[in-house]
Structure formats: structure tokens, C-alpha cells
Image: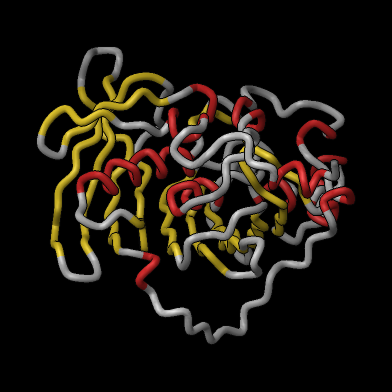
Amino acid sequence: MSEAASVQAVRATIGDSEFDRDTAVTPRGAGVYDVDLSAGWTIINAVNGGYLLAVLGRALADALPHSDPFTVSAHYLTASQPGPAVIRTDVVRTGRTLSTGQASLFQYDDEGREVERIRVLASYGDLDALPDDVRTTALPPAIPPMDQCFGPQDAPAPIPGSSAITDRLFLKLDPATLGWALGAPSGKGEMRSWFGLADGRDADPLSLLLAVDALPPTAFEIGLSGWVPTVELTVHVRSRPAPGPLRVSITTRNLAGGFLEEDAEVWDSADRLVAQSRQLARARLS
């Protein structure tokens, strides 16, 4: 079986997969949820920001009358750690087509003091109720076939620190954006990849919140190294993705003052632009 066929052969299903179990939230009371942040979604000793956004997104999907994220904006205040956390949500407004809410994730420091890690403001709706009219100049990213791309298992050496998240993902990166892995970054600030979950679970709106932040940082291809922590991330979910692998394209046009932006597009197997995002991240310059 080809790689393309194997990634489309669903072994896990939406609602019954590692991603669903690791983003599960348990209601404690009105608008309050308990969650155990999994160490399986860490990279270079940090819990991945897209995974964290999906956790908060799941809590808001339960708290709001609409279940599909349309726009989600998150500010990452302090670094999250694997382990117990509490999410507190608040319904800001409910309407016929959109509902808006906010959520914050908290953990405890070594002295037992509550620390806010992330704060989110989001609007939810019903993606299936949207009209199918599309007028766009956007084009799917030109990524070579999967058998001409490379995944983390092909790397000459592992990334220092934890790379647990790579075991949960199916990544096949465009060789044109892999110069950094060979010590020859292109300087273009581009990253493109085929994307899926390793257990074969198809994408849904919540997993799109992960997809926009799951590739290696564009900073690597600019010539930088090390952790690139997210300061703010906004995601627009445009459509429910079709079954099959996604294609993710991320670009950075400007690095200034130690901060860079990453603009991401996520395309599904039906050549539809299903999610867009922009984040501001801090880059280590030395």
C-alpha cells in the first residue's frame, strides 16, 4: 500500500483517537473543566501551542451552544507544563449563527499559586450551515508527492530535547523547505508539509487548531535554531475538512526585534482552504 493510501486508511476515528483522549476535558462545574495536559505533545521541552489551543477549543465547544470554531485568538502568557490544569470559560454572547466565549487555562507553580497560561477569545458556529459559494485567488501549495517528501524519521539526527509530538503526527515535509535539517537553510522562511495524525484519524475543525502550529518553525529555514515560543495565535476555520491528508504551508516575511510572524494555510484533500492562521512568535537570535 502506498503512503498516500495508508494515511487515508483510517485506523482511529474522530471521537476515538489519541488526539481526542489527550484533549478531553472533564466538566467540574458551571463553565469549569479539568484537563490533564499530555507529555505526548511536547517539542524541545515545551507543550505544543496548537495542542493547547485544541484543548481550550474543546472546552469552548462544550460551553457554547455552537460546536464549531470559526475564529480563535489566543495569547500565550506563560509556558504550560504536562500535567493537571484547569480551564475556566465564560459565555460572552450567544446569537443565532455565532456564539462568542472566552477561556483561560491555569496551572499551579511550585508554591501552589495559580498561574494563567493561556487566554482565548473565540467565536463558534455551524460550519455545515455555511453556503458553498467560494470566490478566491488562493491556490493550494505546490508540494511534491509524499514519496518525494521526508518525515522526522528521515532526519540525520534527532532534535535536541523532547520530540514526543512527532510520534503523534504524520509529517512529510517538502524537501525545498528542509535545508535547515542539512545545515544549509534557504533563508526564505517557508515550511510546507503533508499533515495528518499518526493513528490515521481524519481531520476535523478542532484538529485544524493543531495543524496550523505543528510543523517545524519557519525560523529554522531562516537560519535560527532553538525554541520559538508563540506569543499570540489567531486561527480562522473556514470549512469542515474532507477525509484524507492535509497540506500545510507556512511563511514568514518579516523578522524584526526578535519577533516573527507565521502565516499558515491548511488545505484538505478536496483542494479547499479549510483553515488560515497568523501567529506572532519570539525568535532566539543568538
Toward the left, the furthest residue is 30
User: In x, y percent, where is residue 137?
Assistant: 61, 84
Q: Residue at x 76, y 35 (%)?
A: 152
Which quadrant of the view contains residue 266? bottom right
- Asked whether 72 or 69 is in front, the reply is 69
- Asked whether 253 or 23 is in front, the reply is 23
Q: Is residue 230 left or right of residue 253?
A: left
Q: Residue at x 48, y 51 (%)?
A: 204
Q: Is residue 256 visible?
A: no
Which quadrant of the view contains residue 34? top left
Q: Residue at x 24, y 13 (%)?
A: 111
The N terminus - image quarter: top right
Q: Residue at x 53, y 30 (%)?
A: 41
Q: How is the image coloured?
A: secondary structure
The C terminus - image quarter: top right
Q: Is residue 185 visible?
A: yes
Q: Is residue 120 left or right of residue 2?
A: left
